[in-house]
Amino acid sequence: MKQLLNWDDALNKAEVPLVLVLAILLFYIAFGGFLFACFEPWTYTDAFYFCFVSLTTIGFGDLVPENQESAFSIWLKFC
């Protein structure tokens, strides 16, 4: 019985290192920036900025994808 209680505690305590979470987030933004730089007439810096602003849901609206494939990829990214 004691082992079952410890198992429940282990399920409730899913610990993920902060460095890993930040690395995945940075990769996600950087890769998205690369894709948007390929499909949109933006520099990589603009595309990276757009991905950061979109992912953090700040959404200034100063950069907006122009072609349909890029708009669809944003929708897909948030689903």
Image (cartoon, grey):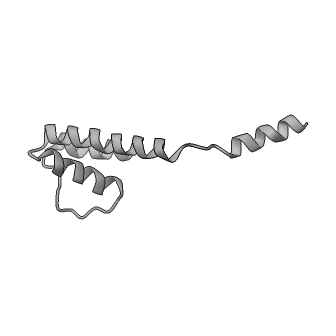
Compared with 64, 75 (above or below) is above
Q: Quadrant of residue 37?
A: top left
Relative side of 16 to 6, left or right:
left
Quarter in which the N terminus is drawn = top right
Residue lying farthest right? 1
Compared with 53, 32 (above or below) is above
Q: Position of residue 78 (x, y in %)?
A: 37, 47
Total labels drawn: 0
Query: Is residue 66 something one can see in this rendering?
Result: yes
Residue lying farthest left? 41
| Residue depicted at x 78% and y 37% | 7
| Residue depicted at x 17% and y 62% | 62
Q: Position of residue 75 (x, y in %)?
A: 31, 46
Query: Is residue 79 something one can see in this rendering?
Result: no
Relative side of 26 to 18, left or right:
left
Quarter in which the C terminus is drawn = top left
| Residue depicted at x 81% and y 40% | 6
Towards the viewer: 30 or 60: 30
Relative side of 53 to 42, left or right:
right
Towards the viewer: 28 or 78: 28
Relative side of 12 to 32, left or right:
right
| Residue depicted at x 84% and y 36% | 4
Q: Position of residue 5 (x, y in %)?
A: 84, 41
Compared with 59, 77 (above or below) is above
Towards the viewer: 75 or 5: 5
Towards the viewer: 15 or 38: 15
Q: Position of residue 64 (x, y in %)?
A: 17, 55
